[in-house]
Image (cartoon, grey):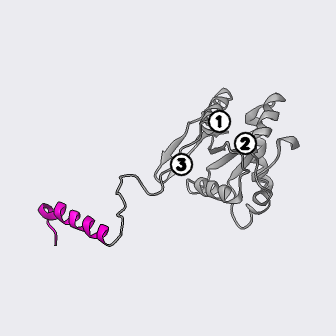
Amino acid sequence: MVNDAGREAFMKCVDIGNRLIGKTPKAKTSQPENPPQKKSAPTVAFEKYLQSLFDAFNLQPRGSFKIVGEQIDGSFILKDEVYLLEAKWTTKPIDKSQLVVFNEKVSSKSGFTRGLFISFSNFTEEAIFTFAMGRTVNIILMTVQELAVALSGGMDIEAVLWNKAGALGDCGNFNKSVFEM
C-alpha cells in the first residue's frame, strides 16, 4: 500500500515502467471524456430571437437553462400551461431520435408540461411518420419557414401555437402545419 508520502515516488516509478514497456500514459485532465457540445452562434442567436418574439406576444418566456443532466433551450407559458422549448438551427433535418429525446425531457417534468420543437431545417420524413408510434406525444413541431409565414401573414403566434396544441390534444397531430390554419 502506498501512503501519501510515497505517492509521488510511486507515480514516477509507474511512469518509468510504462515508458520502458512502450506504454504512453494518458494525461489526466479535470475535463470529462465527452465534454458538452457548445452551441453554435446561430443557435444562440435563434434562441434569443425566439425569447424576444415570445416576450412580444406576452408568453412569459424564460431563456436557456440547465437542470441536472439536461439543458433546456427555454420555456414559455401558453394559456397558463408550461411549454419547454427546443430550438435547432442546423443544416441537417431533425431525425426521430432528437424528437424522442426532447419528448422524454418534456414527459419527465410533469403530466401537464408540453414542448415546442422549432427546426430551421425541417424534420425527416421518417421522424414525422414513426415518431408517435407506441409513445405518448407531448410536443408539437414547427419549422422556421412556418414561423416566417405566420409572422409575414400577420398571424398571432399565440393563436398559431394554440391551434397546433389543439391539434395534438384533439387528434394526436403533433405536426399540424401553419398552412392548414
**Which disc is residue 114 wearing?**
none
Residue at 48% x, 56% y is: 34
Kind of residue sitting beneath label 1: Phe
**Does the residue at mark 1 contact the one at mark 2 (Cβ under 8 Å)?**
yes
Residue 22 counted in the magenta span: no
Q: Nearer the viewer, mark 1 or mark 3?
A: 3
Q: Is residue 90 above or below residue 60?
A: below
Q: Are the two marked residues, 1 and 3, in contact with CB atoms closer than 8 angstroms? A: no
Say which of 11 and 122 sits in front: 11
Rendered location of residue 94, percent (x, y): 71, 52
Residue 178 image position (x, y, % from top left) = 83, 41
CA distance for labels 1 and 2: 9 Å
Quadrant of the image for the C terminus?
top right
Write the residue at 74% across / 65% down.
133
Q: CA distance from mark 3 to mark 2?
A: 19 Å
Q: Main secondary structure of the magenta part?
A: helix
Instruction: Say which mark, if any, is on residue 37.
Output: 3
Q: Nearer the viewer, mark 3 or mark 2?
A: 3
Magenta stretch in the rendered image: 1-20
Circle 2 residue = 120
Extreme residue in the left direction:
5
Q: Which residue is mark 1?
A: 46
Image quarter hosting the N terminus = bottom left
- Crowding at dot 2, Cα within 10 Å, few <14 / some 14-19 / many 20+, comes out as many
Q: Residue at x 42, y 55 (%)?
A: 32
Rounded to the nearest angstrom, the CA distance separating label 1 from label 3 is 17 Å
First-in-chain label (1 vs 2): 1
| Apparent side of residue 181 relative to residue 30 in the rendered image (left or right) | right
Indicate the quadrant where residue 120 lies: top right
